[in-house]
Image: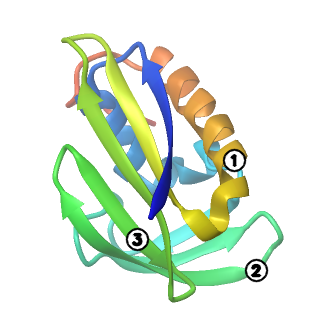
Amino acid sequence: MAINSARQIQAPAAVVWRVLTDVTLWPRWGPSVSAVESADRHIISGSTGRIRTSLGIWLPFEVTHMVPGQSWRWRVGGVPATGHRVHAVDEVRCQLVFEIPAWAAPYALVCRVAAGRIARICADLPSRPDSELT
């Protein structure tokens, strides 16, 4: 069972997807992530690495499920963590959804902050999905 935290973002779904899957951007939008180490800059199903939490603790991660351009889920420290989904509303807007395990319900507040940061990052980017993000 999961709790959803959703936000509509004024950006094409492909642009939001690129922000969600580019590990170099995770510390910019993820309040609980201060650094990332991964062999894959853009995660795929099976990607692994580690994140440094905002508390300074390094934890391993693994992307456990991915539907390219639509959704991904991961495990952090061996524990199922948030899911991430993007759905196009139209050509210039999309719905971003974080799926939060019920046991981590208070994390919905962190996801709201993350969604706001993602919206700001996307507002500063070219709208072409193939544009460089950093």
Mark carried by residue 119: none
Q: Amino acid at mark 3?
A: Trp
Left or right position of 79 against 16: right
Choose between 131 and 67: the one closer to the eye: 67
Q: Position of residue 53 (x, y in %)?
A: 71, 69
Total tally of numbered discs in the picture: 3
Q: Amino acid at mark 1?
A: Val
The residue indicated by pointer 2 is 57
The residue drawn where x is 56% and y is 34% is 115
Q: Position of residue 18 (x, y in %)?
A: 32, 40
Q: Are marks 3 and 1 in contact (CB under 8 Å)?
A: no
Instruction: Give the image quarter of residue 32.
Output: bottom right
Q: Amino acid at mark 2?
A: Ile
Left or right position of 15 against 77: left
| Real-space CA distance between mark 2 and mark 1, rounded to the nearest whole angstrom | 17 Å
Q: Earlier in the sequence, mark 2 or mark 1?
A: 2
The residue indicated by pointer 1 is 110
- Which image quarter is the N terminus in? bottom left
| Real-space CA distance between mark 3 and mark 1, rounded to the nearest whole angstrom | 17 Å
The secondary element bearing badge 2 is classed as: loop
Instruction: Give the image quarter of residue 64.
Output: bottom left
The residue indicated by pointer 3 is 74
Residue 131 visible here: no
The residue drawn where x is 63% and y is 70% is 103
